[in-house]
Image (spheres, rainbow, N blue to C red):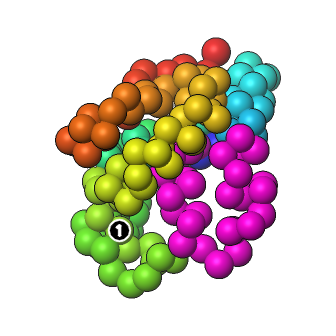
Amino acid sequence: MLIRDPRGSMQSRKHRVWCPGRPDCDDPSTVCSDMQLDYEAAIELSQRFPRRFRVVRYEDLSLNPYKMTKEILQFYGLPYHPEVKMFLDTHTKQDVGGVSSTYRDSKSAPFHWTKDLTFDEVKIIQDSCVSAMRSWGYRNATSERELYDNFNPLLPYSVS
C-alpha cells in the first residue's frame, strides 16, 4: 500500500482535470476519511499477511528511492536488478515533462505543496485530517512561517 500526505495529494489533484468538483477526489474530509480507513485496513492486512503486505509512505520512497526500492524488492523476494538502478538514476534526479511524467526530482516532489498551497488551504486540509495524519505520521504546520521555512512534516509511524 502506498500512502501520501493528504496536503500533497490535495495539491497534486488541483492540477488534474478529472478531480475538481468530485468530492471523492477534492474534498479533504472525504479523502482523509478514506486514508483513516486505509490505515485500519493496513493494520488488519499486516497482521493477516505479515510476509505479503507492506505499507510505504510516498515521502519516504521519494527521499530515499534507492534504499526504499531495495527494501521493497527484498521484502517481496525480488532481485535488485541493474536495470532498476538505471531507472532510478534516470527518473529521480530531475523534472522532465508535465504533471503525469515519471521523471521527477524525487527529493523535492513530495513537499512541493508547502510552496504551492496557502496556509489557509493547508489548515483546512489539516483540520479535516486529524486522525489520518496522526495515524500515518504526518505533522501539522502550525504557522505560515513554519510552513514556508523548510517544513518537515514526517514523524515516525507504525502499522500495528
Q: Residue at x 74, y 67 (%)?
A: 21
Compared across the picture, whether 22 is left or right of 109 comes to: right
Is residue 31 something that shows in the picture?
yes
In this rendering, is residue 93 above or below 26?
Answer: below
Q: Amino acid at mark 1?
A: Arg
Of all residues, the one furthest to the left in this rendering is 149
Query: What SS does tag 1 mark?
Result: loop
Q: Which residue is mark 1?
A: 104
Which residues lie in the magenta part?
3-31
Residue 139 percent location from the top left of the image: 43, 28
Q: Nearer the viewer, residue 128 or 154?
A: 128
Q: Is residue 86 found inside the magenta-colored segment of the image?
A: no
In the rendered image, which quarter contains the N terminus? Answer: top right
Q: How many marks?
A: 1
Q: Give x and y (percent) for residue 142.
A: 37, 28
Residue at image position (68%, 57%) is 26
Which residue, as the protein is rendered here, is positioned at the far bottom? 97
Q: Which corner quadrant of the image does residue 93 belong to?
A: bottom left
Residue for point 26% across, 35% down: 146
- Can see residue 42? no
On the rendered structure, is 159 left or right of 89?
Answer: right
The spot of residue 150 in percent (x, y) is: 22, 42
Q: Residue furthest front?
A: 120
Observer-nearest of 114 and 160: 114
**Relative to 11, is 99 above or below?**
below
Q: Is residue 12 magenta?
A: yes
Most foreground residue, 3 or 111: 111
Kindly indicate the quadrant of the structure image that contains residue 77. Answer: top right
Q: Residues within 10 Å of mark 1 (few under 14, many from 20)?
A: many
